[in-house]
Image: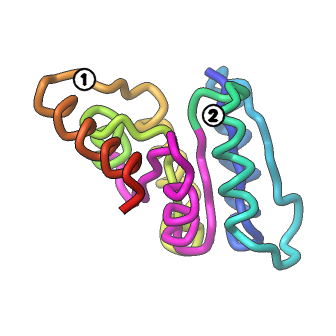
Amino acid sequence: MRVAIAADHGGFPLKGRLAQVLRDSGHEVVDLGTHSTEPVDYPDYARALGRAILDGQAERGVLICGSGAGAAIAANKMRGIRAALAHDTYTAHQMVEHDDVNVCCLGARVVGAELAAEIVSAFLPARFTGEERHVRRLGKVLEMEKEGK
């Protein structure tokens, strides 16, 4: 799978570790930066990662900032992106299975590198179940997105 990965300065060290975990697992990694710990703005990286998914450069994304919250908020402003913050493996696969999430957000100052690798490893193979109740709920979410309010 082609996976886009991006981080702000707070997530930069974890991004490198996760990119290697992804490569070692056979995934193609699209690294969208940042490439240092110099302060940058997380919305810029959320936008780059969202565009990569929407333009077909990647199938899924991993977005990292200090807490993961800002990254998730920013990514969810993009129509067609469904981002969720995961601090555990259950959420990582359930958010795809039930909510068709395409971006996993992580807080580099919240989860350690080993847990982050396990979270990403649970996120990537997960598939949307397509069960009627989840399709119905996702339809309501997409309608909200379309309305913009």
Quarter that holds the N terminus: top right
Circle 2 — which element?
A: helix
Circle 1 — which element?
A: loop
In this view, the residue in front, 84 or 137, is: 137
Q: Residue at x 70, y 30 (%)?
A: 55
Vertical side of 141 occupied by 93: above or below:
above
Q: Residue at x 36, y 24 (%)?
A: 127
User: Which of pointers 1 and 2 lies earlier in the amino acid sequence?
Assistant: 2
Q: Residue at x 69, y 42 (%)?
A: 51
User: In this figure, which residue is indicated by the disc labeled 1?
Assistant: 129
In this view, the residue in front, 92 or 98, is: 98
- Label 2 near label 1: C-beta < 8 Å? no
Q: Residue furthest left?
A: 133
Residue stretch in magenta: 61-89
Q: Quadrant of residue 136?
A: top left
| Kind of residue sitting beneath label 1 | Thr
User: In this figure, which residue is indicated by the disc labeled 2?
Assistant: 54
